[in-house]
Amino acid sequence: MRFQGEEEAAAKVPVTSPFRYNSPLVQVSLIGLVCFCCPGMFNALTGMGGGGQVNPDAANNANTALYTTFSIFGVLGGGVYNIFGPKITLAMGCSTYVLYAGSFLYYNHQQDQTFAIFAGALLGIGASFLWAGQGAIMTSYPTATRKGTYISLFWIIFNLGGVIGGLIPFILNYHRKDKAETVNDMTYIVFMCFMSAGTLISLTILSPDRVVKDDGTHCTNIKYSNVTTEAIEILKLFRNWKLRLIIPAAWASNFFYSYQFDNVNRLMFNLRTRGFNNVFYWGAQMIGSVGIGYILDFSFKSRRTRGLVGVGIVAVLGTAIWAGGLANQLNYSFDKLPNWLDFKRSGSDFAGPFVLYFSYGLLDAMFQCLVYWVIGALADTSETLGRYAGFYKGVQSAGAAVAWQVGKKNIPLLNQLIVNWVLTTLSYPLLAVLIYKAVKDTDGSKPAEDDDTASGLPPPASMKDGYKELENSITTEKDG
């Protein structure tokens, strides 16, 4: 890494417009479009429950394979991003989404899980690259005082993909008979087209050294890393006390998807209504991201206070929503399945479960945006935040891998709800402690400190050499 370039990155350049191509606004919007097309459509496909299939086993097994490989490669994703840069990393990741959707098109005809499981495992690797790059871009390109705003912007564009993706099965399966349980071929084909477009858009993302922040400073000025350096830096993540405090929140943040998608949306609603529900589930995420983004950037002068207030609000809202989920869950079980609800014909019986499912989406966005904001407040450099995001997604995916197998084992629904509620509740005090101890009040003129070396491991040789070169260059200038 070219650490001597940090002085160049700190030099300010004239900012002509927030809409210039190398601005954080445009670049975060572009990564939002990439995720609109790939993870956004994936979320819509998964949100139907069982991947749109009659039997959820194929989707559960594919998702288990996906999140197992994701949990391993997620931690490595930040290193891959630092070595290859955003374009190659994102393009490699996006291409695996197309194959995953195609595997369910194949399953529609052959009823063979092998391809779906293989595609899921490959997607786990690709998604780890995509989300590490996304995390680095979303948290390092904006200035410190506007990270919440840009996280919200990304979340809105990204979840608009889930909204549009929810409309696809809703429209294409609207007039099918009530007993239809598997989506048609065209549903998967349209998903594949969107995902292919996302792969092409990923090639338009600029590298960090070409991005100029809103305050006129360059995002970072680096020479891409090497395998040895990244291996050492990744090992140090596990000894970083700040990241250890994030582990419960990371584990919980995707753990509840299998319960919400398979055991609420799939069990309670017919096929077309699941697509209808997903439009509002992901739409609620757009609303939730705007609300928490405003609180985290504008509610109080002190950044630490804003973070603590954000945790408090999410904790209160989360407790209320999971309490509503408990009231709903007491009405049915695997032994007493509910009659499917339809958004047109079920009347008032539809309203309560629909509002609950909408609220689950609202909470998901607020919870994850809060965690991303905390991660973004721990450092400023694209390299460090890429590793942090990779660590977060790795732990998150390990939790998801376990959750999808829990769903397959037919663990009592009430037990699943209680575990999800406990996991999210445990996260709140730990996030509050982390914000209180590690988030510094800053106006954005002073970057957050990257304390990777606090783990006790020595910095890699490349870092030492970089500092020596910087020191020598300064000494030469003084002598001259």
Image (tube, grey):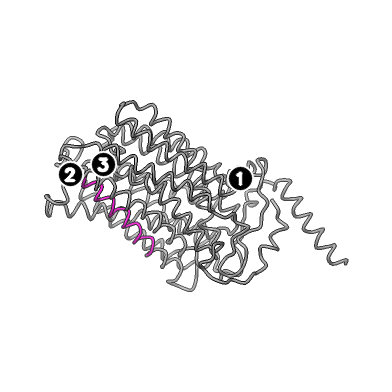
| Mark earlier in primary sequence (1, 2) | 1
Q: Which residue is mark 3?
A: 263
> Closest to the observer: 191 or 212?
191
In the image, 351 versus 308, the foreground residue is 351
Disc 2, SS: loop
In three-dimensional space, the C-alpha distance between marks 1 and 2, rounded to whole angstroms, equals: 47 Å
Residue at image point 38% right, 31% down? 116
* Residue at the disc numbered 2: 175
Dot 3, how many residues are within 10 Å of its Cα: few (below 14), some (14-19), or many (20+)?
many
Mark 1 lies on residue:
84
Stretch in magenta = 272-290
Residue 36 is marked as none
Q: Position of residue 470 (x, y in %)?
A: 77, 58
Q: Say which quadrant the C terminus sits in.
A: bottom right
- For the stretch drawn in magenta, the main secondary structure is helix
Q: Amino acid at mark 2?
A: His
Residue at the bottom extreme, as displayed: 301
- The residue drawn where x is 82% and y is 58% is 472
Q: Is residue 199 above or below residue 10?
A: above
Horizontal side, residue 344 vs residue 322: left or right: left
User: In front: mark 3 or mark 1?
Assistant: 1
